[in-house]
Image: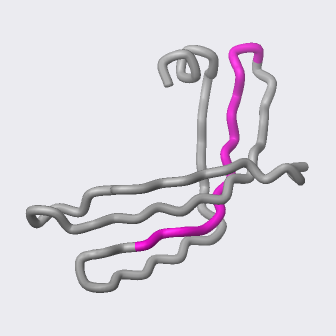
Amino acid sequence: MENFNASIKDFHGSYENLVVRIIGDTGLLCGIYTEKITELDDSVRVVKVRYSSTWMKLDGKWTQVMGHRDTQFNNP
């Protein structure tokens, strides 16, 4: 992450689709978001990302126990 952060000028993410399901002490999130990354040379990259994560309530706090994200290859 340190190398990634050092190589970019600006980063914005926006959710296009967010699905949340909570069953007892387990939460599931999934959807799609778009990352807009401005490089140090002012070039801009727009990347669509699919994600999912699993959360559990442990000791009264929601904790992420699993996560996955992958870049969609049909980006504009």
At x 89%, y 53%, the residue is 74
Residue 49 place in picture, x, y as percent: 68, 53
Q: Is residue 65 left or right of residue 74?
A: left
Q: Quadrant of residue 65?
A: bottom left
* Magenta segment, prevailing SS (helix, strand or loop): strand
Q: Quadrant of residue 38?
A: top right
Out of 53 and 6, give the one closest to the viewer: 53
Decide: is 69 above or below 54: above
Q: Is residue 76 left or right of residue 14?
A: right
Outermost residue, left side: 59
Q: How many marks?
A: 0
Colour scheme of the rendered structure: one colour
Tell me which segment is drawn in magenta: 28-41
At x 59%, y 48%, the residue is 13
At x 47%, y 54%, the residue is 67
Q: Is residue 55 left or right of residue 10?
A: left
Residue 36 place in picture, x, y as percent: 69, 41
Out of 26 and 29, give the one closest to the viewer: 26
Residue 50 place in picture, x, y as percent: 66, 59
Outermost residue, front side: 66
Find out whether residue 7 is within the magenta segment.
no
Decide: is 76 above or below 23: above
Residue 43 place in picture, x, y as percent: 80, 24
At x 74%, y 52%, the residue is 48
Find out whether residue 31 is within the magenta segment.
yes
